[in-house]
Amino acid sequence: MSKNFARLVFGFTLVFFAVFFLWPILQILKGGFIDADGKLTFAYLASLLTDPIYLGGLANSFLLALTTTTFALLIAMPLAFITDRFVFPAKGFLGSLILVPMILPPFVGAIGIKQILGQYGALNAFIIDLGLRPEGWTFDWLGANQFLGIALVNAFSLYPIIYLNAVAALANIDPAMEEAAENLGCVGFRRFFKITLPLIKSGLFAGGTIVFIWAFTDLGVALIFDYSRVTSVQIFYGLKDIGGNPFPYALVAVMLFSSVAFYAIGKGLFGRDSYAMMAKATSSGGPQALPKGRAWLCTALFGTVTFIAVLPHIGVVLVAFSNDWYGSVLPSSFNLGNFEIALGHDLTVPAIANSLKYASISTVIDLVLGVALAYVIVRSKIAGRQILDFLAMMPLAVPGLVLAFGYLAMSQDGKFFSFLNPTRDPTILLIIAYSVRRLPYVVRSAAAGFQQTSETLEEAAQNLGCPPLKATFKVTLPLIMANLIAGGLLAFSFAMLEVSDSLVLAQKQLYYPITKAIYELFQLLGDGKYIASALGVWAMAFLGVTIAGMTILLGKKLGAIFRV
């Protein structure tokens, strides 16, 4: 491969990340730690950390992330273990449904779950119909504990990320190691905690980190639940004051430091160790057949978790097909009117077109830059290429809300990038934000493809007179096309349904993407939530097809692109 090409990619990547990753973060730090005279100050931070409202928001965000990650681990680990170790009825079908919770942004699912668990929701109506409570009885299941409701909605939406990594980690364990422990008397839960868990903890860390940071910085679900006592919502409300108030900057800086610190601590505790495995042929491993009763118990466990996880989706679908759903188990009538209105509403038609435009352009950028980066990282011998790998993965460790706020800060009037100010036209900033946030998925997918494809094929083409880059395009890229399609689909679909960047940067209705349109519609009185749900069902169908395609293309390797 041409060293000049590798150096070009290296230089361009450094500039790209310096301008659109490091610079926004520096603007946040400058706004929160530099006073009006240009001097370093910790006064804003000190005021913030002594304010019980902001301190309470940080504490709630941390506890929410911890609770969500714990719930997601408790949901994902048993499912991953029985999938890897046992054969049970409908295993293939239930395994294919595991990704269903990811086909809807959690904040859209919150609309459905509110309809089911609200004061006049389906659950209360069902309890009254059973005669367990008198007519007219109400109980606000969500209002009783909003914190727990948000944690559960997020956990049931995000647990597939941990599941994917856990399944991949379990599949890599040499069964002979567990059999040796069993022969020495270490069995059952003791064997799991002494042998199995240490061997897969780096894989669990990979998925758990994404879930933790996602939940720590989540904005959409908290907004739908009207839960303002978290840092992300406090930052969102502080956007109106971004020009002259340093406290939103300081708050975002604290969120950034916290996320990086949590990641570093987790990496130090769980992410460092890796263990060499013998070839699996040393043992007759593989899923085992279970007695009929236990096999059906596994099926029931899988089915129950999947049903609970898709309850928000069911709620959204039912709301989308109804005109009125109040105080009954099911809507009083069903029709397609909301879908017709959604596709003709002043807010939704431009939003769909905008999202398609933003996501398409950002995906092209990710594919071009991601393939070039992966090629240099895997194929070249250039010094410092691991820096590229580190930079490419960093957007996974930095919250989307932080980056979005950074883009907003660096494009304020009077700044060098003021021509990108989203109050006038957020198109360029949204495309850049989507590109930076989803680049890691394309790099991971492409790098995996390059690692699995022998370099000798390119060398053979070069020996026949084909230049290095042409050999890559003619030989290697067609061989790793499944990886590239999977990474591109994931980048495109997640960009279509991006929440933090869309809510923060899209400030004019003319430029709203889908998720901002859904949020604004939900805020409307009357039929707003019905139209919002109809738009959510469209998004659900779109992402469902996308994830199904990725699953077919990558199979168990899908979990690898969710690693930091």
Image (cartoon, rainbow, N blue to C red):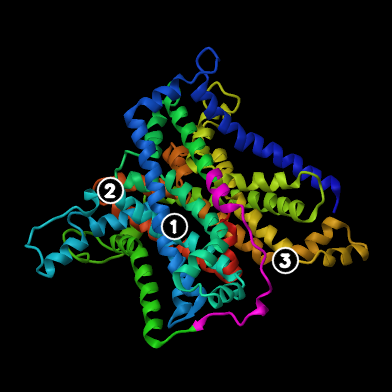
Task: Kindly give the residue lying farthest to the top in the view shown.
Answer: 37
Name the spot of residue 364 as percent of width and height, x first: 64, 52
Give the residue displayed 58% in from the left and 29% down from the top. 26
What kind of residue is marked 2? Answer: Gln
Q: Is residue 269 magenta?
A: yes
Q: Are marks 2 and 3 in contact (CB under 8 Å)?
A: no
What kind of residue is marked 3? Answer: Gln
Name the spot of residue 94 as percent of width and height, x first: 44, 75
Badge 3 or badge 1: first in the primary sequence: 1
Disc 2 is placed on an element classified as: helix
Looking at the image, residue 261 lies above or below residue 353: above
Give the residue displayed 49% in from the left and 32% down from the top. 253
Question: Which of the pair 522/349 is nearer the observer?
Answer: 522
Visible residue check, residue 180: yes
- Crowding around mark 3 (Cα neighbors within 10 Å: few <14, some 14 to 19, many 20+) is few
Cα separation, mark 2 vs mark 1, equals: 18 Å
Q: Are marks 3 and 1 in contact (CB under 8 Å)?
A: no
Q: Is residue 301 magenta?
A: no
Q: Place residue 398 in its image quadrant.
A: top right
Visible residue check, residue 344: no
Looking at the image, residue 46 lies above or below residue 301: above
Q: Which mark is residue 452?
A: 3
The magenta region covers 264-288
Disc 3 is placed on an element classified as: helix
Q: Which mark is residue 146?
A: 2
Residue that carries the numbered disc 1 in the rendered image:
158
Q: Quadrant of the N terminus?
A: bottom right
- Crowding around mark 2 (Cα neighbors within 10 Å: few <14, some 14 to 19, many 20+) is some
Name the spot of residue 127 as percent of width and height, x first: 15, 65
Badge 2 or badge 3: first in the primary sequence: 2
Cα separation, mark 2 vs mark 3, equals: 46 Å
Cα separation, mark 3 vs mark 1, equals: 29 Å
